[in-house]
Amino acid sequence: MQTSFVSSSSFLRNAFLALFVFAPSFAFAHTGHGSTNGFQHGITHPLLGFDHICAMVAVGLWAAQRNGNAIWLIPLTFVSVMGSVLGVSAIDFPFLEQGIIASVLILGVFITAAVRLPLIASTVIVGLFALFHGHAHGAEMPNTVSGLTYAIGFITGTSFLHLAGIGLWISIQRLNNATLLRYAGGAITACGVALCFA
Ligand SMILES: [Zn+2]
């Protein structure tokens, strides 16, 4: 137990160190937003964007790992906050791309180290991440019907990715192998590091 705690905290320390070392290259990670018109563009963007896929699947995985009401509350918080921010384009939000990559890295570390926070803290953290994911696109979305359908598509795609994360956790549970979940977290963290160089 002691050993596992020590290795978890040293992993956390290294991961956060990497976050700061790679921070300068974060700005180049989000490769274009594409068209922000219509349902089809909305649903495909998160499903095709590597950074969104990693973070949104991670939200589902972390929520399922925490268990209980968190399974639906954490993803619901992400989708609600992100959806609300999609509609607000007037607020200038700094460090957008850095925030998106930080969300991948931090969630990856949380899953790997099986970090279990109070439910309210978990929802606040996930809600904060959702601000970055939503605003990256809300800022570019037109204030028209096609902008609205884009938002609905984006929310649908995001929900699908959360469900994929929960589904992945259920599959891992069936295999009865807790280590596998940590590997999944490690893979997400590695994707976050890779995104720093993208
Ligand atoms: Zn995007």
Image: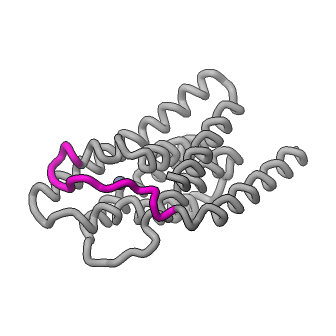
- Residue at position x 51%, y 62% from top? 26
Query: Left of 71 or right of it: where is 39?
Result: left
Position of residue 43 measured from the top left corner of the image (x, y, whole percent):
26, 44
Q: Residue furthest bottom?
A: 91
Task: Residue lying at the far left in this picture: please name it.
Answer: 145
Q: Is residue 59 left or right of residue 137?
A: right
Residue 152 rendering spot, x and y as whole percentages: 22, 51
Ligand 1 sits in quadrant? bottom left
Which residue is nearer to you in this view: 133 or 155? 133
| Foreground residue among 97 and 24 | 24
Q: Is residue 139 above or below residue 53?
A: below
Along the line of sight, which residue is nearer the eye, 88 or 196?
196
Q: Position of residue 146 (x, y in %)?
A: 12, 55
Residue 2 pos. (x, y %): 90, 48
- Outermost residue toward the top in this view: 175
Q: In the picture shown, does residue 146 fall above or below 183?
A: below
Whether residue 68 appears in this view of the structure is: no
**For the N terminus, which image quadrant?**
top right
144 and 68: which one is in front? 144
User: Which residue is found at the position 63% from the left and 21% from the top?
Assistant: 175
Taking the spot 34% from the left edge, 65% from the top edge, the residue there is 135
At 24% from the left and 65% from the top, the residue drawn is 140
Q: Does 142 lie within the magenta span?
A: no
Give residue 131's quadrant in the image. Answer: bottom left
* Left or right of residue 25, residue 116 in this image: right
Q: What scheme was used to colour the molecule?
A: one colour
Q: Which residues are magenta?
A: 26-41
Residue 150 can be seen, yes or no: yes
